[in-house]
Image: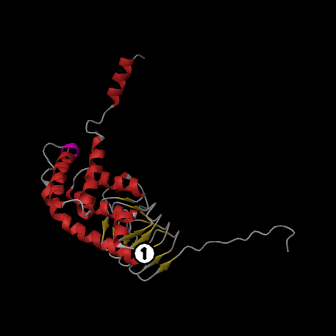
Amino acid sequence: MDKDDIVRKIKDHKKQPNLRFRLKTEVEKFSNKLFLCLFDMETPVEPSLLELEAQFTSLAELACWDPENSCKELWGQYLEKLPVILEKLNLDAEAIADCDPASLSLEEVYMAYPGFYAIAIYRLAHELYNFGFPLVPRLMTEYAHSKTGVDINPGARIGNSFFIDHATGVVIGETAVIRDHVKIYQGVTLGALYVAKNLEKTKRHPTIENNVTIYANATILGGNTIIGENSIIGGNAWITSSVPPNSTVFHTPEIKIKTLPNVP
C-alpha cells in the first residue's frame, strides 16, 4: 500500500466532522481564566470578563454544532451566575479550613487543596450543564479530573459547604445529589448500581443528606440509595441500600494472626 492509499484510508475513517481537539485546549484556558478571575487578586475583573466573553464565543463556535441553536447568547446568563458561584465556593473553602486541622490558612485552601480546585471547576461547569451547553462542561470537569484525581460529573447536584479531603480517587456520578455540609475523603465513589444505556434518563446515583461524613474508599451505589442526615460512613464500606439518619456504618476487618510452627 503506497502513501496515497494510506492517506485516503485514514481520511475515510475520520468520521466525526465536529471532532476538533483544540476545543479541549480552549476549554482548559477558559477554566484557568475563570478560576483566576474569581480568586486571584492580581487578575483584574473587568478586562478578564471581556477576555472570558471572547473565549466563550470561541467555545460556542466549536461546541455548538446545530446552526439553528447558537450558544453565544448564553454568556450573559452565565455571567449573572458567577457572583453566586463565587459565594458558594467561598463557603466551600471556609468549610475545608474549618474542618481540616492541617489547614493553616484560607489562602492555603484556595491555592493548594486539589479538592477545592475540583469543586470550583465543577461549580463553574455545572451552571453551563444546566444551560444545556454541549460538551464544554464535561471537558471542564475532566480537566479538573486530570489535575486533581477527582472525577465530578457536571450534572451532579451539590449543596453548600462541601468538603473533599485529600481528594485523589473521588468519583461523583451525574445524577448524584449531595446536600449541605457534607464531607468526603479520598477514594469515595458515589456511583451507579447498574450500567446500561437505557438508564440514561433515570437517577442512577445516590443522594447524600445534610451533615454526612464519608470516609476513605467507601462505595455508595444506586439511584434509590439515600444516606440519611448526620450519618457517618466508615472507610471501605460498600453500600447499595439506604441508611437511616443519625447512623454509623462501618466495615469490620477480619484479623488473622500468623504463628510460626514450633513457636510457643
Looking at this view, is 61 or 156 the one in front? 61
Q: Is residue 62 magenta?
A: yes
State the image coordinates of residue 73 (x, y, percent, origin top left). 12, 53
State the image coordinates of residue 142 (x, y, percent, origin top left). 35, 53
- For image coordinates 37% across by 61% down, the residue present is 173
For this orientation, the residue located farthest to the right is 262
Give the quarter of the image for residue 172: bottom left
For this orientation, the residue located farthest to the top is 2
Give the quarter of the image for residue 40: bottom left
Picture quarter with the N terminus: top left
State the image coordinates of residue 258 (x, y, percent, origin top left). 75, 68
Work out whether 15 lies above or below 133: above
Looking at this view, is 113 or 156 the one in front? 113
- For image coordinates 36% across by 27% down, the residue present is 10
Magenta range: 61-65
Q: Identify the residue position indicated by label 1 in the image.
A: 100
- For image coordinates 43% across by 79% down, the residue present is 231
Q: Is residue 171 magenta?
A: no
- Secondary structure, magenta segment, majority class: helix
Work out whether 7 lies above or below 61: above
Q: Is residue 98 left or right of residue 58?
A: right
Dot 1: what SS?
Answer: loop
Give the quarter of the image for residue 220: bottom left
State the image coordinates of residue 190 (x, y, percent, origin top left). 41, 65
Looking at this view, is 217 or 226 the one in front? 217
Which amino acid lies under the numbered mark 1 shown in the image of this protein? Asp
